[in-house]
């Protein structure tokens, strides 16, 4: 009984302290207490539920049978909206807190919510090398299903909870220098349009719609299914770690490795203006036992901290990482965001005792953050991905340093084809770009969220780059459509009578347009 009495006394003292200080004080200044005691266990229960559900659906083969019925239900809801006079815009009924984006979408409260319960893998067609999926299928769900079958996606966007709905925005991984962005690996989309009709689009069938859907953020129709290319999987990624010093050398080495097609994966972690670790990976079925690192195991160090060891030791290294562990290497630490929420999260004692519950669900973090934390994050925290031409990498890192001074920075190269749509290179040829991800608290003294981000957005426009739309965007309408090519998008909104059914993408995602 002694341990139980001690635990009870500890909980009583904690409750008295919370009562004295107030819950808001606890959530702002000691958020880790709430996260560790409540959100981590809840996150485990969420995972168990969805894993059991996915297993049951797979065993009963119910997803393909129920898919048509669910789509018809969506069409019925759209028809009801029309019959009611279409007085407000439509949007998906998925609660805003369930999305991985940190942005708070207030439009959910005023728009007609269309319930879309589509979260299953419909078919894996080995002969055609495609997987047919519903939009709420997660990346973790897909790799868990495909990898044991010997297949994988060409581009597996980081974080387990990201969904196929990324098609409406965008997704990227360290294989994107070969395959492009996530949408470039998609072969077909199925959408319910503003008139309630179900349409399939491919590069040769309804091709304008196919190319306009990415980056449209659900403002052309409701995505109900997609066909995505799959490729043969291998057991391991043979990963080379190379520390590089000097900004010019960092950019030269990263560009050089990104152009090598023999590299299946290329990634850079920039730890300061002059220090980085550049990693290149090759898929393989063979591995040396002594060099296998199962980095995804709960007790292992966070990946970005593990990579930093090579920089501190100033030595190169080679490891063999199981493929699925590699695909989700940044999941446990949410890249490096978790260190701001649980400062001791990478401590070996914490990892061994509680690491199996990590990470907390981003959706639960959003649901429980409260207005005070939301404003604090908005003013003193950045989560941004800027896509810039590789030729502007050195200038871009310098700008990130002067305007934000957030480290590490994530570097991920990708090839951008000259396809129609909102995002394409300035010229007529495909071009090598790089995603620069900044996640954390800016250390620059003059940082002010709106002014600093507007300055950053202006720089990105000037180098013909793009801002990922999951994050806070401060551009006005003219600046937004200067960054993105809206010609095809606006043409289709006119043709498909979207203007009264869905908000314009700018009005949906930009802070200057939201109230």
Image (tube, helix red, strand yellow):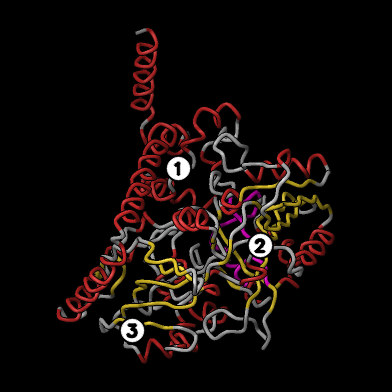
Local packing at callout 3 (Cα closer than 10 Å; few below 14, some 14-19, many 20+) is many
Q: Position of residue 351 (x, y in %)?
A: 55, 32
User: Which numbered circle lies on residue 498?
Assistant: 3
- Residue interval drawn in magenta: 433-458
Local packing at callout 1 (Cα closer than 10 Å; few below 14, some 14-19, many 20+) is many
User: Which numbered circle lies on residue 360?
Assistant: 1
Q: Is residue 435 magenta?
A: yes
Local packing at callout 2 (Cα closer than 10 Å; few below 14, some 14-19, many 20+) is many
Q: In the shown orientation, is residue 308 left or right of residue 315? A: left
Question: What residue sits 67% from the left and 50% below the top?
Answer: 407
What residue sits right under mark 2 in the picture? 412
Question: What residue sits 66% from the left and 41% below the top?
Answer: 293
> Extreme front residue here?
127
Tell me which label, 3 or 2, sits earlier in the chain. Answer: 2
Give the structural element (helix, strand or loop) at label 3: loop
C-alpha gap between disc 1 and disc 3: 37 Å
């Amino acid at each position: 009984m002694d341990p139980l009495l001690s635990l009870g006394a500890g909980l009583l003292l904690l409750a008295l302290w919370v009562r004295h200080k107030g819950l808001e004080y606890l959530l702002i200044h000691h958020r880790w207490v709430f996260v560790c005691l409540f959100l981590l266990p809840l996150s485990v229960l969420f995972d168990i539920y969805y894993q059991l559900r996915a297993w049951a659906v797979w065993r009963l083969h119910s997803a393909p049978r129920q898919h048509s019925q669910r789509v018809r239900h969506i069409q019925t809801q759209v028809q009801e909206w029309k019959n009611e006079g279409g007085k407000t815009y439509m949007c998906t009924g998925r609660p805003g807190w369930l999305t991985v984006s940190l942005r708070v979408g207030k439009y959910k409260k005023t728009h007609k919510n269309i319930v879309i319960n589509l979260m299953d893998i419909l078919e894996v067609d080995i002969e055609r090398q495609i997987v047919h999926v519903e939009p709420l299928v997660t990346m973790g769900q897909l790799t868990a299903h495909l990898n044991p079958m010997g297949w994988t996606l060409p581009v597996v966007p980081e974080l387990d909870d990201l969904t196929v709905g990324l098609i409406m925005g965008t997704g990227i991984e360290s294989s994107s220098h070969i395959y492009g962005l996530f949408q470039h690996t998609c072969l077909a989309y199925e959408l319910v349009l503003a008139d309630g009709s179900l349409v399939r689009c491919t590069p040769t069938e309804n091709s304008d719609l196919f190319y306009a859907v990415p980056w449209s953020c659900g403002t052309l129709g409701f995505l109900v299914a997609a066909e995505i290319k799959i490729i043969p999987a291998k057991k391991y990624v043979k990963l080379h770690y190379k520390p590089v010093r000097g900004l010019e050398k960092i950019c030269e080495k990263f560009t050089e490795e990104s152009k090598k097609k023999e590299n299946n994966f290329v990634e850079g972690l920039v730890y300061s203006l002059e220090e980085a670790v550049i990693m290149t990976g090759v898929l393989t079925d063979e591995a040396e036992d002594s060099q296998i690192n199962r980095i995804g195991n709960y007790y292992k160090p966070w990946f970005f901290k593990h990579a930093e060891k090579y920089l501190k030791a100033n030595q190169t290294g080679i490891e063999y990482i199981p493929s699925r562990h590699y695909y989700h290497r940044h999941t446990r630490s949410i890249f490096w965001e978790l260190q701001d929420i649980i400062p001791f999260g990478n401590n070996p004692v914490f990892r061994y005792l509680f690491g199996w519950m990590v990470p907390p669900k981003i959706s639960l973090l959003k649901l429980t953050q409260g207005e005070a934390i939301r404003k604090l994050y908005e003013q003193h925290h950045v989560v941004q991905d800027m896509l810039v031409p590789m030729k502007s990498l050195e200038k871009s890192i310098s700008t990130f340093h002067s305007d934000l001074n957030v480290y590490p920075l994530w570097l991920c190269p990708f090839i951008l084809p000259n396809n129609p749509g909102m995002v394409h290179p300035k010229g007529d040829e495909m071009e090598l770009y790089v995603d620069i991800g900044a996640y954390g608290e800016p250390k620059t003294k003059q940082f002010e969220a709106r002014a600093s981000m507007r300055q950053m957005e202006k720089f990105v426009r000037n180098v013909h780059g793009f801002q990922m739309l999951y994050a806070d965007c401060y551009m006005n309408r003219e600046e937004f459509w200067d960054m993105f090519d809206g010609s095809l998008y606006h043409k289709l909104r006119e043709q498909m009578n979207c203007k009264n059914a869905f908000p314009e993408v700018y009005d949906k995602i930009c802070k200057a347009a939201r109230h």
